[in-house]
Image (cartoon, rainbow, N blue to C red):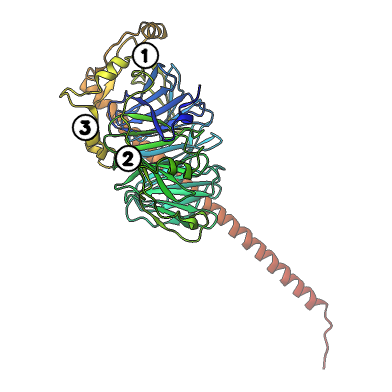
Amino acid sequence: MPTMSSVMEDPTLERHFKGHKDAVTCADFNPNRKQLASGSVDKSLMIWNLAPKARAFRYVGHQDVITGVQFSPTGNLVATSSKDRTVRLWTPSMKGESTVFKAHTATVRSVAFSHDGQRLVTASDDKSVKVWSVHRQCFIYSLNQHTNWVRCARFSPDGRLIASCGDDRTVRLWDTSTKHCINCFTDYQESATFVGFNSSGTCIASSGADSTLKIWDLRTNKLIQHYQVHSAGINSFSFHPSNNYLISGSSDSTVKILDLLEGRLIYTLHGHKGAVITVAFSRAGDLFASGGADGQVLMWRTNFDTKSYQDILQQHSRRSSPGPPPHVTDIHPRGPHLHRPQPTAIQISPTVADTQSTDPHVIELGQSVHSTTLLNGQTHTTPTQAAANSHHSNANAHHSNGLPAHREASSRVGGWMGDESTSRARTTVWSQSGDGGGGRGRREEEERGQTHPLEVLSGHPSSLDSTLRHIVQQLDILTQTVSVLEERLTLTEDKLKECLLNQSQLLRDVRSSEERQRTESEETDGSPVHFT
């Protein structure tokens, strides 16, 4: 049986996933090609199984908006970042366990694994980029030269470099061995929103709130491509594994596909109602996902990497007019060119409908309110129960006023991008209900397929809430204090090394001086005395 990609020439909408109650902020495919993860303003992590009619899993633990998600290279772990200032490392299983990493003092905007899976890099509104050990589950070091919020940070494929960007309108390149900033690109008029390496590590791309996307060649440190094909800020992009294509998602509600070899826009996809906040290719490049303010995750299949660009244009000659020749100079770094939309770009406006199955059955997995904070800044939490399913998810797809969820979600995307207090005030806090004791009841629930609506978290005494808030504040202060002490210890260690080096040099100088004096005195004593 031929695959969909072999009989259709365009990117096609293959699945859509509904289950989030608010805007989708991040997405990533499992390297095993069987799962897709997404994070949302609703504070939950969803793991979608790509097989038709398979169950989806909702993991609850973060206390605020989830801003970033990524599978480990082996696919056995999922990392998430959040506006609650933490990073969580999840085991995507029925247990729903997660480990909490805490060292940032403000919103964590992104999280990414190194390609060997041994380290994590995070970017934060505390103006720092931090690197963590996955195995030791602790913070390692900070990179601190950004002067405003850091929006995104990524490892190079070989792990020797880190690229970061932020609201200070810069894209910085860091050497992971020396911890020094080795390059800084400052070509943006507004915030730099996203950054990433191509699969070979020879180029980095970055996007901006000024709707531009730029690609630099790291071998020459030159800007080699400059695209301005969106009409609003770009929130996310993803390189195709072949490095020949790139997809971008924008607040103009579209997904664009760029042909990097030809240097032009080839597809514009209209599927979301509201801003497109995240896009991601699968590891094989045959699928890509997009998520946005409408609360939906769309999964697309494409074969544009298996067909020549000229063949595609010929197939669309009836609905596309001839355009200017491609920028051949962009293949070699002779100088940047500004790329704008061409008439040859193909517009695709699919009817957003699930072509594979009905909305998946959603299994709720969450944590208890109790957790143990460790000295190195990590917290390990254990699950207490699983509940709820697709009936509840579908019911919550519309608000009490009868309007679709995406209309309210689109008004909240501004809060996710900037205004924290607005987003926090509008986001509903949910907790799990059901038997906190155990696995047997949970599995029986799943087998029967029964639904139990979630309950609003309202049963805690106010005195307990205030005590917990006070404890959290004190822990935040302790974390900040430890961070400051670590930096001071590092400075002190450097100064001590410098003093020891100076002392060693002084001792060598004194010894050489004494030896010179001794030699001179011996020569004086041994010379004959002449009388006149």
Q: Say which element carries label 1.
A: strand
Q: Say which element carries label 2.
A: strand
Q: Mark 2 points at which residue?
A: 254
Disc 1 from disc 2: Cα separation: 39 Å
Q: Position of residue 63 (x, y in %)?
A: 31, 28
Q: Is residue 140 above or below residue 180?
A: above
Residue 71 lies left or right of residue 343; in this view the side is right
Residue 181 lies left or right of residue 43; in this view the side is right
* Viewer-side residue, 519 vs 336: 336
Disc 3 from disc 1: Cα separation: 32 Å
Are the two marked residues, 3 and 2, in contact with CB atoms closer than 8 angstroms?
A: no
* Viewer-side residue, 155 vs 227: 227
Q: Tell me the crowding category of disc 2: few under 14, some 14 to 19, or many 20 or more residues within 10 angstroms, Cα based.
A: many
Q: Position of residue 528 (x, y in %)?
A: 84, 83
| First of labels 3, 1 by sequence position | 1
Identify the residue at horizontal 55%, vertical 42% (top origin): 159
Q: Name the residue under label 1.
A: 385
The total number of labels drawn is: 3
The kind of residue tagged 2 is Thr
Q: Position of residue 379 (x, y in %)?
A: 42, 27
| First of labels 1, 2 by sequence position | 2
Residue 487 lies left or right of residue 191; in this view the side is right
The kind of residue tagged 1 is Gln
- The answer to whether any part of residue 106 appears in the image is no
Q: Tell me the crowding category of disc 1: few under 14, some 14 to 19, or many 20 or more residues within 10 angstroms, Cα based.
A: many
Are the two marked residues, 3 and 1, in contact with CB atoms closer than 8 angstroms?
A: no
Mark 1 or 2: in front is 2
Disc 3 from disc 2: Cα separation: 17 Å
- Quadrant, the C terminus: bottom right
Q: Is residue 79 above or below residue 199?
A: above
Q: Position of residue 256 (x, y in %)?
A: 37, 42
